[in-house]
Image: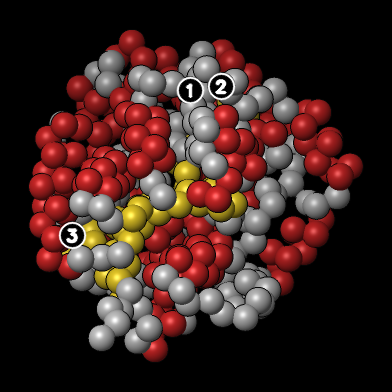
Amino acid sequence: MKKTPKFIVVAGARPNFMKIAPIMAAFANRDAARGQVVTKLVHTGQHYDRRMSDDFFSDLGIPDPDINLAVGSGSHAEQTARVMIAFEQVCIEEKPDWVVVVGDVNSTLACSVTARKLGIKVAHVEAGLRSRDMSMPEEINRLCTDAVSDLLFTTDEIAVNNLRKEGVPDDRIDFVGNTMIDTLLRNLDKALTLPLPAELQERKYAVVTLHRPSNVDSAGALRPLFNALQKVAERVPVIFPVHPRTRSRLQEFGLLGADMNIHLIEPLSYLGFIGLVGRACLVLTDSGGIQEETTVLRVPCLTMRNNTERPITCTLGTNTLVGTDPERIVAAAMDVLNYGVRESSVPPKWDGASGERIVDALLAQVGIVRPAVDPLECSASFASTEWREIETIGASDGRRDQAFAVVDCEPAAAD
């Protein structure tokens, strides 16, 4: 009797949830629902705060995980090791044909290496992103995961070229677009109907996220950044959904004073956060994914880092890499507040159908091929009329050339 192909999809931390939602939906809507394949969702439990994890499953309509490893927090080594030990047992018991990992968190690395050592094929969603900064744990995770993966799904052509320069053959690379944008488009209308925090007016406030250890784990790094944000807050209200790590550092370094004019709020659900960002006039962040979301939302984004693994958001999108110099951050923010959003366009294939493309490719790997169709037509819930209009507007060569001309951010050169 022929074995039914089995796929295990892995999620570990908040950024993963937005990326797996369209993949799980595409499996459920198609052959998996008719018994041709088995799909199981494994949650490693890397994010252990309920607001940072379980609530996202509810917001995004992701089914409850079939398996929860509940590894919790710890150092990078501790967390990675616990995931590997627990996931190895899952693989031995479930015997999947493919393990699908997303993003660049510790769970991504742990599960890809574990599966590959057991002879299980690995597909990496969001492959090929490179910051060229080996001090970032995420960069190590990306490089190692891509090295062991059999199939590499990329979000843009820059990522494709990165992989080619590293010697990856074209038959392992598949440019499918961005599943996080699938999730954004699917949920945007609902998010924009949610009420804003009291006294906020649409397009008249800024949003801040700040959580990277290099920015928040020392007073010497965090204090000047926070002072820069205070200056921005003198011009417009600044709303700061505070990551638990950042809040503890703000308290430790004595930055939470009565004279503070930045509005700190608790971390938001996915829908709440997208609703907040989508109506802002400016976002200041050190996050990766927010650079992509603001590009599609046409909201100016200032990234407080010295590099980015998502340079396409600078060359085509609304993102500007401003580093961590307070004067530069304030100057860039004032430019946005004075002159508004610059000319931009949405990257190719960020159209709401990436999850469908990924599932098509995965099913083809196990011999299930459907007739050729437009992925947008079979992903109506992920693609809106508004998006198609935006895509058409952003597709002209003149618009794209202009976007390249006005942006001071180039892809990092290969080592």
* Amino acid type, label 3: Cys
| Location of residue 314 (image quadrant) | top right
Viewer can see residue 138: no
- Which label sits in the foreground, 1 or 2? 2
* Amino acid type, label 2: Ala
* Residue situated furthest right in the rendering: 398
Residue picked out by circle 2:
414
Is residue 10 or residue 390 the one in the foreground? 10
Q: Point out which mark residue 91 bears.
A: 3
- Earlier in the chain: of badge 3 and badge 1, it is 3
Residue picked out by circle 1:
132
Element assignment for label 1? loop
Element assignment for label 2? loop
Question: Which class describes the residues within 10 Å of circle 3: few (<14), some (14-19), or many (20+)?
Answer: some
The chosen color scheme is secondary structure
Counting from the top left corner in percent of width and height, residue 51 is at 26, 55
